[in-house]
Amino acid sequence: MSEKPTQNAAPSDAAGESVQDRELRETLGTGLGTAQEHLQQNGGFFPFGITLSDDGELRIVMVTPGEPDEDGHIDAGQMLADLHELLRQGRDEFRAVAIVSDVSLPEHGSDGIHGAAEHRDGEVRAAIIPYSPAAEGFIFAAMEPDTHEPSVWVD
């Protein structure tokens, strides 16, 4: 009889949720909630990351935007690329990360918050929250699951 390999199995807590699941949910939820707060307070946000360190501390990670183009627009795509690179460089210090950005959702006829969380043990979770401007702030639709490929713990 051979033993089953257990190196990829995450320990479970009493509710049946693995530590990996809980850490992904916490990291992604923090990122999505932070984005909602920034939208309500500032009317927008630049892409940012949330990291979960080995000691369980959540931290926000931001990169400096480049110079605006001639129309005054910031290259959010370049900011996302820089953020991914920064998180890849520091990945040995993290248990999980989330990357959050403001996206256009043509299928919803609105904009949305996109968040993708990745665990160093391999699991990925992503979600979007469609939103639209209202008289006072924004109206957020229900969170929807989304797909995403690993981008931090890849070589």
Image (tube, rainbow, N blue to C red):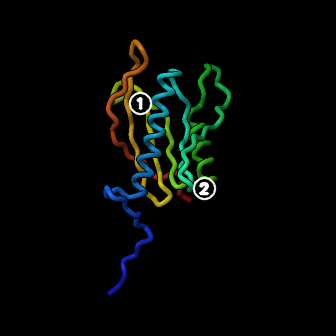
Find residue 47 and report its image quarter.
top right
Compared to residue 111, the image places residue 122 above or below, namely below
Q: Residues within 10 Å of mark 1 (few under 14, many from 20)?
A: many
Of the residues under marks 2 and 1, which one precedes in the sequence? Answer: 2
Where does the N terminus fall, quadrant-wise?
Answer: bottom left
For the residue pair 70 and 24, the one nearer the viewer reads as 24
Task: Evaluate if marks 2 and 1 touch, with contact meaning CB atoms under 8 Å apart.
Answer: no
Q: Residues within 10 Å of mark 2 (few under 14, many from 20)?
A: some
Residue at (45% x, 32% y) in the render: 103
Label disc, if present, on residue 70 of the rendered structure: none
Residue at image mark 2 = 93
Task: Say which amino acid is labelled 1.
Answer: Gly
Residue at image mark 1 = 112
Q: CA distance from mark 2 to mark 1?
A: 30 Å
Percent coordinates x, y for residue 125 in the rendering: 40, 48
Where does the C terminus fall, quadrant-wise?
Answer: bottom right
Residue at (44% x, 43% y) in the render: 28
Task: Say which amino acid is labelled 2.
Answer: Glu
Q: Secondary structure at mark 2?
A: helix
Residue at (43% x, 41% y) in the render: 29
Q: Secondary structure at mark 1?
A: strand
Find residue 130 and report its image quarter.
top left
